[in-house]
Image (tube, rainbow, N blue to C red):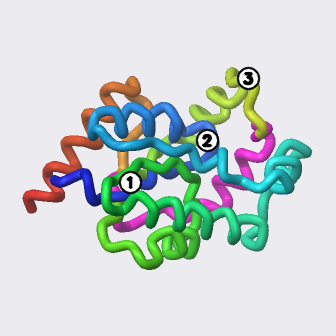
């Protein structure tokens, strides 16, 4: 697979490991990594920090910005961490892009809830996890990996699936 012309969206609920896995995947592929959280407008960050889930209107401008970011890097490839919880969000992220791959980090509510409880210094309070699971529409056309393994094992699984998908 020629990674230099692909955009990889590493997706899943908060606490699933998007940043950790995204950075490792980008390093493995030799392309840039971008954390979608860094592109949220301040109003979204404030809303989440106060325990309120984002709605579709809150997310629209953010998703459009991530789509622009993907287009800016479509000739050299990139990994972008983004929750991409709903099918319509993924459609917006994919708009105008040909070579795009979603990587879904799959984990149980219990596992991710424990991870969030242990995480410090993030604007997303653990209480909002339930709303993310409720909003999640599991992608059909994505590389899906369990987050129960170690980060290097997860990235190895992603690479294996990407190589298999490319061959066949």
Position of 61 relative to 142 (above/below): below
Position of 30 relative to 6 (above/below): above
Q: Which of the numbered marks, if any, corresponds to residue 8?
A: 1
Left of 109 or right of it: where is 156? left
Q: Nearer the viewer, residue 77 or 36?
A: 77
Q: Position of residue 34 (x, y in %)?
A: 51, 45
Residue at disc 1, secondary structure: strand
Badge 3 or badge 2: first in the primary sequence: 2
Residue at disc 2, secondary structure: helix
Q: Find out whether the residues at labels 1 and 3 contact each other: C-beta distance under 8 Å.
A: no
Residue receiving disc 2 = 109
Cα separation, mark 1 vs mark 2, equals: 24 Å
| Residue at image location 43% in from the left, 31% down from the top | 148
Residue 137 within the segment the image draws in magenta: yes
| Residue at image location 25% in from the left, 33% down from the top | 156
Local packing at callout 3 (Cα closer than 10 Å; few below 14, some 14-19, many 20+) is few
| Residue at image location 31% in from the left, 28% down from the top | 153
Cα separation, mark 1 vs mark 3, equals: 27 Å
Cα separation, mark 3 vs mark 2, equals: 18 Å
Local packing at callout 2 (Cα closer than 10 Å; few below 14, some 14-19, many 20+) is some
Badge 1 or badge 3: first in the primary sequence: 1
Residue receiving disc 3 = 120
Query: Which stretch appears magenta?
Result: 124-143
């Amino acid at each position: 697979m020629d990674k230099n012309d692909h955009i990889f969206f590493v997706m899943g609920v908060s606490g699933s490991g998007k940043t950790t896995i995204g950075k490792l995947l980008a390093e493995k592929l030799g392309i840039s990594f971008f954390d979608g959280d860094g592109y949220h407008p301040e109003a979204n960050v404030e809303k989440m920090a106060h325990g309120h889930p984002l709605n579709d209107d809150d997310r629209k401008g953010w998703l459009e910005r991530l789509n622009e970011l993907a287009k800016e890097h479509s000739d050299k490839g990139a990994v972008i961490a983004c929750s991409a919880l709903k099918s319509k969000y993924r459609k917006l992220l994919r708009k105008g892009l040909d070579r795009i791959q979603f990587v879904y980090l799959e984990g149980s509510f219990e596992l991710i809830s424990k991870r969030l409880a242990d995480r410090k210094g993030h604007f997303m309070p653990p209480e909002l996890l339930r709303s993310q699971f409720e909003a999640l529409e599991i992608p059909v056309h994505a590389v899906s990996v369990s987050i129960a393994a170690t980060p290097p094992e997860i990235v190895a699984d992603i690479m294996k699936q990407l190589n298999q998908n490319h061959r066949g």
